[in-house]
Image (tube, rainbow, N blue to C red):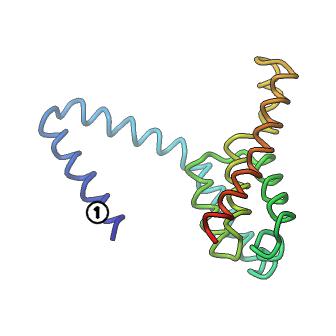
Amino acid sequence: MFTYALYIICLIVAAVSWRKDKVKTKKALIKAWKAFENILPQFLGILILVGILLAVLRPETISALLGRKSGWLGVGIGAILGAVTLIPGFVAFPLAAMLMRGGAGSMQMGAFISTLMMVGVVTMPVEIKYFGRRMTLLRNGLAFVFSFLVAWVIGVVVR
C-alpha cells in the first residue's frame, strides 16, 4: 500500500511540475530516463545473478552460510562478500532483502551491506592512487571493523 502512495505522490508532483514549466519538466524526465538506462544493465545483471544463486542455492544453504544460526562466522562471510563485491546501493538493498527471504540473517546482511557501502577492495587501486596506500588501508580496515559493530547493533536491536 505504501508503494502505491509513493507512486501517487510522484505523479502529483510531476503533474504540478509539468503545469508550472513543461520544458524543464520534460528535460528532467529525459535526464531521469537516461540515468535509468545507464543503471539498468547493472541492475538486471545483479538481479539475474541473484536469481540464479537463489535457484541453485537452497534456502538451507543460505541459512547455513548467512543465517541467524551461522553467528559471527556468517557475519564474517557477509562482511567479506560485501567488501569484495562492487554493487551500487540501489541494488544492494533489494539483494539483501531477497537473501533474507532466502534465509539470511539480519546481522549477516548488516555486515554485508555496511562493507558493501564502505569497503572497496575492487576500487583500492584507484583509492591508493589518490589517497596513498596508508590512508586507503586505514580507511578500509576501519570500515571493515565498523561493519562488525553495525552487525552487533542490528543483532541487539532486532532481537
List the single residue furthest toward the left.
Answer: 19
* Image location of residue 89, percent across then percent down: 59, 47
Taking depth in this image into account, of 105 and 35 the one nearest to the observer is 105
Q: In which image quadrant can residue 3 be found?
A: bottom left
Hey, what amino acid is under mark 1? Ala
The quarter in which the N terminus is drawn is bottom left
Q: Does residue 157 lie above or below 138 as drawn?
A: below
Q: Residue at x 30, y 32 (%)?
A: 27
Q: Mark 1, residues whose alpha carbon is within 10 Å: few (<14), some, or many (≥20)?
A: few
How many labels sit on residues?
1
Taking depth in this image into account, of 146 and 45 the one nearest to the observer is 146
Q: Residue at x 87, y 22 (%)?
A: 133
Q: Does residue 118 lie above or below 70 as drawn?
A: above
Pointer 1: what residue? 5
Q: In which image quadrant can residue 72 be found?
A: bottom right
* Image location of residue 6, percent across then percent down: 31, 58
Label 1 residue SS: helix
Q: Residue at x 79, y 53 (%)?
A: 79
Q: Does residue 140 lie above or below 148 as drawn?
A: above
Q: Residue at x 81, y 23 (%)?
A: 135
* Image location of residue 80, percent across then percent down: 83, 52
* Image location of residue 77, percent across then percent down: 84, 60
Taking depth in this image into account, of 78 and 129 the one nearest to the observer is 78
The quarter in which the C terminus is drawn is bottom right
List the single residue furthest toward the front.
Answer: 156
Q: In which image quadrant can residue 120 be found?
A: top right
> In the drawing, does residue 4 fall left or right of residue 57?
left
> In the drawing, does residue 152 fall left or right of residue 97?
right
